[in-house]
Image: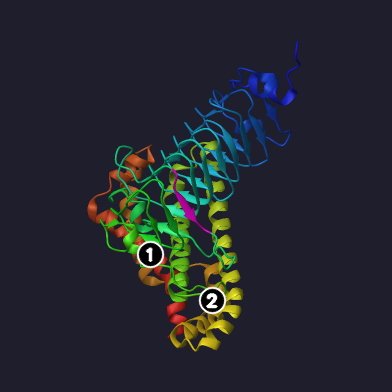
Amino acid sequence: MMTVPPHVRKLMEQGVLIPAPASVEIDERINPLLIAPGVVLHTGTKLLGEHTSIGPGCVLGEEGPVMLKNCQLSSGVKLQGGSFEGSVFLGRSSMGPCAHVRAGTLLEEEAGGAHSVGFKQTIFLPYVTAGSLINFCDAMMAGGRSRKEHSEIGSSFIHFNYTPHRDKATPSLIGDVPRGVMLNNDPIFLGGQGGLVGPVRIDYGCVTAAGTVYRRDALEPNMLLTAKSRGVGHPVPYKSGAYRGIARIVANNLIYTGNLWALTQWYRFVRRHFMERNPFDHACYNGAIRLLEDARRERIKRLAELAKNLKESIAILSAKGDGPELAAQHAFVKAWPGIEEAVRGGPEPDFSVDQLQDVFSAAWDRVSGSEKDYLKAIKNLAPDEARAGTAWLQSVVNQIACLFSNAES
């Protein structure tokens, strides 16, 4: 008869369901009070890390072994199989088998992926869904109004997040935070067997055709994006080390980071009300705040690498006499220390921003006072109230997004 390890037995005694206890591994650093009664841990589950928390109704490992390390799960989360580390999963989010989810991933309510999906520094707002065989790192995606009307990534899709210059200043923003959190925008569809070359921005309602590798921003809503949009129809000379379009690259990075700050403000002043009602959601709140802090540090790190890489690019362009691009790169290298300090500090106090926040806060107090479900509370906002919230969050984004343009002027 196989002996049940003491940490496993402790969980079973408090109501955690473990059908094959001898096959489950529980790290001694796990706080048993943060594993809810009724959680199901199937064969081959491994729980690691002092920051791991699993809320009511969660099921791990139904279709394959699961390694869960320092993750926070709200309620009703299903992780079918794979490895998960340093990530946060909110209510009824899910991942299929063979997942590889690394640090910096946040899946909000009912978001998730099918089988063989890789995430890192990935943020999905509610309902966003990834198909199978996907690698989607360093990106944020929003869009859609419900589980039936959601933004989706088709199977065999890649977000290309590493450049020939050996940097990762490539975060792509599909949708945005100010409008996305309101759950009232058209979904975005990224067609299967395709990809995005980051950093790009895609507006709501846009569709990339299957098989398309898209390289440009699509800032007009409800557009069909095809391979013809990439702007290159034949091979052209190319030399690694010489950047092009640096103003757009920096702008997209700052807009992305501004959205991270906006989502942080949303959690602090809006979502927090719904995430302090039990220890599991509270752990998810703390985990999300830490995750967003780490995500901002990641973006700062990548922009710092970009600024360093531009020294070689400037030397190459100087030999060619490429005036406008050269001027933009010089401007960014010069402005970067000040930009870095401002990005780290976040949005500064601003009377107009505070006014917008106060307007939305009054509306939020009205709809959230007696409502227990976050998604229902959001949908109870009147259109003008939702617009007020979007205006507040967009003003937060704008404070970060304008740092380079202000430095240039």
Q: Nearer the viewer, residue 248 or 186?
A: 248
Residue 298: image location, x then y, percent: 58, 60
In the image, what residue type sits under mark 1? Arg
Q: Is residue 303 above or below residue 322?
A: above
Upstream in the sequence, badge 1 or badge 2?
1
Residue picked out by circle 2? 242
Q: Is residue 36 above or below residue 339?
A: above
In the image, what residue type sits under mark 2? Ala
User: Considering the numbered disc 1 on the image, is that residue within a helix, a strand or a loop?
Assistant: loop
Q: Nearer the viewer, residue 110 or 157?
A: 157
Q: Nearer the viewer, residue 205 or 383?
A: 205
Residue interval drawn in magenta: 156-161
Q: Residues within 10 Å of mark 2 (few under 14, many from 20)?
A: some
Q: Is residue 374 left or right of residue 335?
A: left
Distance from the alpha carbon under mark 1 to that under mark 2: 18 Å
- Label number found at residue 351: none
Q: Residue at x 60, y 69 (%)?
A: 305
Outermost residue, top side: 1
User: Considering the numbered disc 2 on the image, is that residue within a helix, a strand or a loop?
Assistant: loop
Q: Residues within 10 Å of mark 1 (few under 14, many from 20)?
A: some
Q: Nearer the viewer, residue 2 or 242?
A: 242
Q: Is residue 373 left or right of residue 40?
A: left
Give the position of the C terminus as an image quadrant. bottom left
Give the position of the N terminus as an image quadrant. top right
Residue picked out by circle 1? 216
* Residue 359 visible in rendering: no
Can you tell which quarter of the image residue 12 is in? top right
Q: Residue at x 30, y 37 (%)?
A: 148
Residue 142: image location, x then y, percent: 38, 51
Outermost residue, front side: 234
Residue 161: image location, x then y, percent: 52, 58
